[in-house]
Image (cartoon, rainbow, N blue to C red):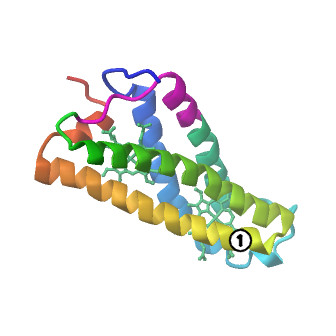
């Protein structure tokens, strides 16, 4: 996989747009409380539209990750932290792609088990994103290695 010196502008923009959309999907999740009473051909509530957008943007991000690549992990980090960080990133790709699928299966196929899976996946996504955020803030404010700039638009 390519190892460019930094994330591209598009990768950075997509990262933050997806963060905003996932937060919005969480904030709007009570729109789906009565989903079993909505006909499957009813207009998809905004929660679902936002979630599907996350899915397509994550596919674009995954393609960028695979074909354009990502910068190597910060080299001052212990090797185990570099591995955990990269693994966490792949888990975030997987969860942010699978969560919308499970919601879509529940809504369109009236599939109760998919709704249970959706609840589990959104919890895992929340926990993984929280750990990822904590790690970013740890780097920024405790290690003070300027890591957040890697996901910023300003280039040195
Ligand atoms: C990354 C994208 C998404 C996130 C983070 C997300 C998050 C959530 C959350 C937090 C809930 C509330 C669960 C609860 O009450 O405990 C929920 C419920 C639900 N979502 Fe999503 N969702 C996403 C995408 C979608 C999509 C694309 C659809 C449909 C096309 C969808 C359909 C549903 C349905 C049907 C429920 C109700 C499930 C139930 O009450 O058992 N979601 N979602
Ligand atoms: C829904 C929440 C989030 C998701 C799904 C997410 C997802 C990701 C993914 C998949 C990557 C790896 C990109 C790659 O190398 O292919 C990444 C990198 C990064 N994220 Fe997030 N992120 C989230 C929230 C946050 C937040 C809130 C912060 C900051 C406080 C943050 C800061 C960063 C930074 C600094 C990187 C670059 C890490 C590096 O390569 O050194 N992320 N994020």
The kind of secondary structure element at disc 1 is: helix
Taking the image as four quarters, which one is ligand 2 found in? Answer: top left
Q: Is residue 34 visible?
A: yes
Residue at x 40% of width, y 29% of height? 70
Structural crowding at the residue carrying mark 1, measured as other residues with C-alpha within 10 Å and reported as few (<14), some (14–19) or many (≥20): some
Residue at x 48% of width, y 22% of height? 68
Query: In the picture provided, is 45 more to the left or to the right than 155?
Result: right
**Total label count?**
1
Tell me if residue 29 comes above or below residue 7 in the rendering. below
Q: Nearer the viewer, residue 79 or 2?
A: 79
Q: Position of residue 101 (x, y in %)?
A: 70, 55
**Residue assigned mark 1:** 115
Q: Is residue 46 visible?
A: no
Q: Position of residue 47 (x, y in %)?
A: 63, 61
Q: Nearer the viewer, residue 116 or 153?
A: 116
Q: Which quadrant holds the C terminus?
A: top left
Q: Name the image quarter holding residue 82.
A: top left
Tell me if residue 137 comes above or below residue 4 in the rendering. below
Query: In the picture provided, is 106 more to the left or to the right than 48?
Result: right
Q: Position of residue 80 (x, y in %)?
A: 28, 47
Q: Nearer the viewer, residue 156 or 86?
A: 86
Q: Residue 83: within the magenta?
A: no
Q: Which residues are magenta?
A: 60-74
Residue at x 22% of width, y 40% of height? 147
Q: Position of residue 127 (x, y in %)?
A: 43, 65
Respond yes or no on whether mark 1 lies under 8 Å from ligand 1.
yes
């Amino acid at each position: 996989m390519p190892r460019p010196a930094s994330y591209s502008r598009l990768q950075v923009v997509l990262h933050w747009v997806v963060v905003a959309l996932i937060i919005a999907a969480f904030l709007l999740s009570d729109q789906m409380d009565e989903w079993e009473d909505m006909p499957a051909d009813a207009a998809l509530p905004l929660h679902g539209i936002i979630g599907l957008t996350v899915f397509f943007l994550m596919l674009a991000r995954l393609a960028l990750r695979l074909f354009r690549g990502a910068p190597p992990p910060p080299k001052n980090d212990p090797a185990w932290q570099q591995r955990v960080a990269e693994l966490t990133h792949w888990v975030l790709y997987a969860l942010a792609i699978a969560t919308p699928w499970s919601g879509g299966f529940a809504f369109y196929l009236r599939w109760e088990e998919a709704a249970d899976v959706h609840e589990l996946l959104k919890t895992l996504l929340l926990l993984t994103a929280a750990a990822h955020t904590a790690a970013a803030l740890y780097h920024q404010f405790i290690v003070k290695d300027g890591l957040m700039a890697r996901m910023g638009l300003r280039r040195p």
